[in-house]
Amino acid sequence: MNSMVYIEGILADEKARLLEKKQDYESKMKLLPRGSIVHKKIGGKSYPYLMFRENMKVKTVYIKNIDFDSISKQIEDRRRMEKALKNIKENLKVIAKVIK
């Protein structure tokens, strides 16, 4: 019986940690750009654009060469966070089932 209480305590701590991490990722993701970088060929040259959805419409915004590395890294960071957030949500579902 004591071991069950101990395990529930550990799971409650893990749930709190995961909820905190989830909130942290969600707040950081609000600051990062959404979408993908695409390259359009215009006049034989390739130009980078940020493509994303806004109100059910696809928007494209030109990325200046000076900003390309920064935006590319931010997109990569957002994708990494989205993947981690998905794992966190799955783990929270498992914990919710066990704690019931």
Image (cartoon, helix red, strand yellow):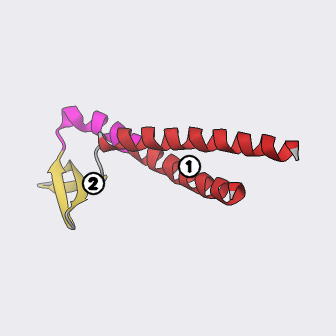
How far is the residue under mark 1 from the one under mark 2? 29 Å
Q: Position of residue 23 (x, y in %)?
A: 44, 42
Q: Residue at x 86, y 43 (%)?
A: 3
Name the residue tied to disc 1: 88
Residue 71 belongs to the span the image colors magenta: yes
In the rendering, which numbered label is found on residue 27?
A: none
Query: Would you say the magenta stretch is mainly helix, strand or loop?
Result: helix
User: Is residue 47 placed above or below 74 in the rendered structure?
Assistant: below
Left/right of residue 99 with respect to residue 4 in the rendered view: left
User: Which contiguous range is marked in magenta?
Assistant: 63-77
* Element assignment for label 1: helix
User: Is residue 61 placed above or below 21 in the rendered structure?
Assistant: below
Image quarter for residue 52? bottom left
Image quarter for residue 31? top left
- Under mark 1, the amino acid is Ile
Q: Residue at x 58, y 40 (%)?
A: 16
Q: Position of residue 50 (x, y in %)?
A: 23, 50
Q: How many other residues sit within 10 Å of disc 1, few (<14), some (14-19) or many (≥20)?
A: some
- Under mark 2, the amino acid is Val
Q: Residue at x 74, y 46 (%)?
A: 8
* Of residues 76 and 32, the one drawn nearer to the viewer in this rendering: 32
> Is residue 76 visible from the viewing direction of this image?
no
In the rendering, which numbered label is found on residue 38?
A: 2
Left/right of residue 79 with respect to residue 91 in the rendered view: left
* Of residues 65 and 21, the one drawn nearer to the viewer in this rendering: 21
1 and 2 marks in contact (CB < 8 Å): no
Q: Residue at x 16, y 39 (%)?
A: 64
* Element assignment for label 2: strand
Q: Position of residue 41 (x, y in %)?
A: 19, 56
User: Is residue 71 placed above or below 62 in the rendered structure?
Assistant: above
Query: Which is nearer the N-term, disc 1 or disc 2?
Result: 2
